[in-house]
Image (cartoon, helix red, strand yellow):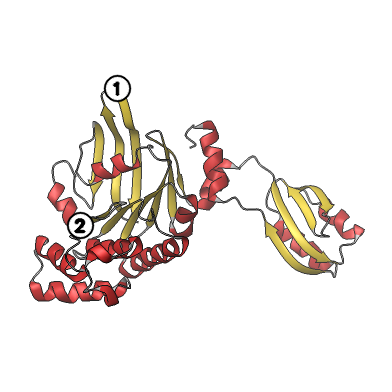
Amino acid sequence: MEETIVLADVSKEYGSFKAVDRLSLSIRRGEIFGLLGPNGAGKSTTILMMLGLTEPTGGSIRVCGHDPRTEPLQVKRKVGYLPDDVGFYDDRTGMENLLFTARLNGLPAEKARERAEHLLSQVGMEQHAHKRAGTYSRGMRQRLGLADVLMKEPEVIILDEPTLGLDPEGVREFLLLIQRLSREQGITVLLSSHHLHQVQQICDRVGLFVAGSLLAVGTMSELSAKLFADEPVVIEADVFPASDQLLEKVGSLDAVTHVERAHSGELVMTCRSNAAADIARLVVESGASLHRLSTKTYGLDEIYHRYFEGGQKHA
């Protein structure tokens, strides 16, 4: 798959302080990538280097095929950037703010108005188009901000902590809006955040970032497989009737190391590898009813904290 953003061995130093330390990262066209890390990890510095707003001390960056250091205008034409606090002219309406952005990007007046109306509808702001931006709530300003970065039809959208200050329902709606727009228009999205749940909700892949270094990159399942490779697989099953004979057969499987009945009556099996298919087969062959079979999965919170316990890179 084509890569839209490529960073190779990128560093950024301020005197003796390393804000970003030999960062290598590739983001694929059309994916939603989450850059996850605590405040001060170097996420915003990395974004500024991608946009050509600050220069790296070392390494190379390509965004949509351009080098932000030598071709900053070409990068800015193809990338939309939404910071955590969007600035608008508060005495102008939402529509007027979008038309101003359109003029800055050289869009003809007729096309600009048509596109602004379309985008305001897409982000759910058509009813507020002619209200002054100074009257907008935080959530409305973020929606207008998303319409604003889409005015120039970017290939990439970079969102830096875009949900700060939004209530839970506002966060949910905003993230779903980003996801829908990315899927429908094939836009590459880089979402920088320190909120695990939000990143897990919509991102295809995640990069765990701390103290200027990228500890790990992958999908949830890939990160979990790397991190918990030596952990036993825990499988739970609701079976009726769960006879002693069935427990003995399940326990005789090579991959199963332990079987027990929980207080709730379900079977809990500890395995060396995922034996779910073999367990299901034995239950069905025994004539018992299998109501549920599940394998324990690790969420981003567990993955995040486990990686950060050691603070070491995982291959």
| Discs 2, 1 touching: Cβ within 8 Å | no
| Numbered disc 2: secondary structure | helix
Task: Report the amino acid beneath label 2.
Answer: Lys
Toward which corner of the image does residue 23 lie, by quadrant?
Answer: top left
Q: Residue furthest right?
A: 244
Secondary structure of the residue carrying numbered label 1: loop
Task: Rate crowding at label 2 as few (under 14), some (14 to 19) or many (20 or more) other CA atoms within 10 Å.
Answer: some
Q: Where is residue 257 in the image (x, y as percent from the top left)?
A: 78, 45
Q: Name the residue under label 2.
A: 78
Residue at 77%, 52% in the rendered image: 269
Q: Picture coordinates of residue 224 (x, y %)?
A: 56, 47
Residue 301 image point, x, y percent: 54, 47
Which residue is nearer to you in this view: 154 or 199? 199
The residue lying furthest to the top in this view is 16
In this rendered view, identify the residue nearer to me: 137 or 247: 137
Upstream in the sequence, badge 2 or badge 1?
1
| Three-letter amino acid code of the residue under disc 1 | Ser
| Residue at (52, 46) in percent of width and height | 223
Residue at 8% over, 73% down = 109
Look at the picture and state if 199 lies above or below 93: above
Name the residue that disc number 1 marks.
Answer: 16
Instruction: Classify residue 145 as left or right of residue 40.
Output: left
Q: In this view, does 141 lie to the left or right of 174?
A: left
* Residue at x-position 45% and y-position 63%: 172
Kindly identify which numbered label has been placed on residue 60.
Answer: none
